[in-house]
Image (tube, grey):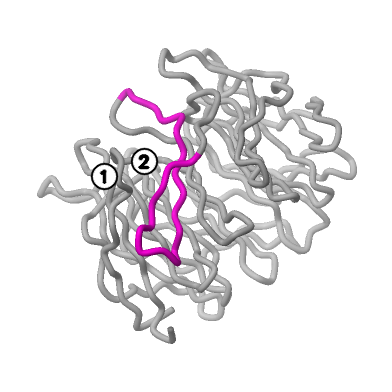
């Protein structure tokens, strides 16, 4: 992915979007949903990006509800689940719905047991879905529940050890379906992490803690099953700290720091084993320009970061990053320092393409 280039692409043809989810449809198109269109306005509409068409953008079928601060994931059968979050009036919801690409329609499914926003979600090896934490509009939650797509039922499972919202979660590769959760707000930042074992339905703290408490960050998995906790917001400033979790020892150790501190970025684990991070907010400059247009690449062999050539056409945070079927990287939307929402689109083409 080195020596590539960024290219501006046709805009999303609608008002800008931030904090969207993006998934691959069976025909290779990209399905984008949710998020917000501008401050205080939330999107129940969806968009479809066709990388093979001259006219790339088209409308998708709208969701039944507007979901902001929701959780979303693609199910094993290709359907797309979105659950919880809050509506435009601020009401925290427990409703859930599924998009079926074969019918191009949304269908309401069973509601979660608990209304929650700013929660996290992960898939288990058997196709069930784990949702945990968040807040219900009043309290930060420890509770967790599992959705079974085959029975359309949510079932409460054991609660996390500590309450968390605005945290990150990931299915640990090669672990038998275990899920790692880390960081977040309790209230107060936490540097703790814990692992859910679906076989026993129990939570266990990691042997040690991350190097610092953080939120506004992502967990990304390496091919060997280790997991990165990248940057984020810590102690009222963006951090360049990166920690590496080893599931074999259940412990954290430092990895190479980011070149630029950032939170509210987009990231992805690439097919070649590298991890990319794009945009975000540095919250560390004095010139009033805190959002970023640069991208960095993590090398799992050296545990170091290097900057990719070029930059996005505009710096932004709360953007969406997606890997296209041909290996190119699609970046959409986001906001500037003032919260203005962009409809911008950029594509990164690796140097070997």
Residue that appears at 81% across and 27% down = 153
* Left or right placement of residue 314 versus residue 216 in this view: left
* Circle on res. 18: 2
In-front residue for pair 241/65: 65
Above or below, 52 relative to 181: below
User: Is-magenta flag for residue 230?
Assistant: no
Q: Residues within 10 Å of mark 2 (few under 14, many from 20)?
A: many
In the foreground, 272 or 199: 272
Name the residue: 52% across, 23% down. 65
Residue furthest toward the right?
A: 200
Q: Nearer the viewer, residue 351 or 219?
A: 351
Say which quarter of the image contains residue 79: top right
- Disc on the earlier residue, 1 or 2: 2
Q: Residue at x 72, y 38 (%)?
A: 130
Relative depth, front residue between 244 and 264: 264
Q: Position of residue 157 (x, y in %)?
A: 81, 29
Classify 160 as above or below 140. Answer: below
Q: Quadrant of the N terminus?
A: bottom left
Number of the label disc, if any, that sits on residue 169: none
Q: Is residue 86 left or right of residue 294?
A: right
Secondary structure under badge 2?
loop
Asked if residue 47 is among those painted magenta in the image, a careful observer would answer yes
SS category of the residue bearing label 1: loop
Tell whether 260 sits left or right of 116. Answer: left
**Residue name at image x 43 percent, y 42 percent:** 59
Range shown magenta: 40-60
According to the picture, the residue beneath numbered tag 1 turns out to be 342
Distance between the alpha carbons at the discs numbered 1 and 2: 7 Å
Badge 1 vs badge 2, beta-carbon distance below 8 Å: yes
């Amino acid at each position: 992915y080195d020596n590539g280039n960024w290219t501006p692409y046709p805009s999303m043809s609608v008002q800008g979007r931030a904090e969207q989810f993006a998934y691959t449809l069976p025909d290779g198109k990209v399905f984008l949903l949710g998020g917000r269109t501008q401050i205080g306005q939330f999107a129940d509409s969806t968009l479809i990006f066709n990388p093979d068409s001259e006219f790339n953008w088209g409308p998708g079928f709208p969701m039944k509800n507007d979901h902001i601060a929701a959780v979303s994931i693609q199910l094993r059968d290709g359907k797309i689940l979105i659950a919880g979050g809050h509506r435009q009036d601020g009401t925290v919801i427990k409703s859930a719905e599924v998009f079926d690409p074969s019918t191009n329609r949304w269908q309401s499914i069973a509601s979660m047991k608990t209304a929650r926003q700013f929660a996290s979600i992960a898939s288990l090896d058997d196709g069930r879905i784990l949702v945990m934490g968040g807040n219900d509009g009043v309290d930060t939650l420890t509770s967790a529940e599992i959705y079974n797509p085959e029975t359309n039922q949510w079932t409460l499972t054991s609660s996390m050890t500590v309450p968390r919202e605005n945290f990150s979660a990931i299915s640990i590769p090669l672990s038998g379906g275990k899920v790692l959760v880390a960081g977040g707000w309790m209230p107060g930042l936490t540097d703790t992490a814990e692992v859910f074992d679906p076989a026993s339905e129990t939570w266990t703290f990691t042997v040690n803690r991350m190097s610092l408490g953080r939120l506004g960050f992502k967990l990304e998995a390496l091919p060997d099953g280790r997991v990165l906790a990248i940057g984020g917001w810590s102690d009222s400033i963006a951090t360049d700290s990166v920690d590496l979790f080893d599931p074999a020892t259940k412990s954290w150790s430092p990895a190479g720091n980011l070149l630029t501190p950032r939170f509210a970025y987009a990231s992805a684990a690439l097919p070649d084993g590298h991890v990319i991070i794009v945009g975000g907010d540095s919250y560390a400059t004095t010139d009033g320009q805190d959002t970023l247009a640069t991208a960095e690449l993590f090398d799992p062999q050296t545990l170091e970061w290097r900057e990719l050539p070029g930059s996005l056409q505009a710096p932004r945070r709360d953007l969406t990053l997606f890997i296209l079927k041909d290996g190119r990287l699609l970046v959409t939307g986001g906001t500037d320092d003032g919260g203005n929402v962009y409809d911008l689109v950029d594509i990164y083409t690796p140097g070997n393409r």
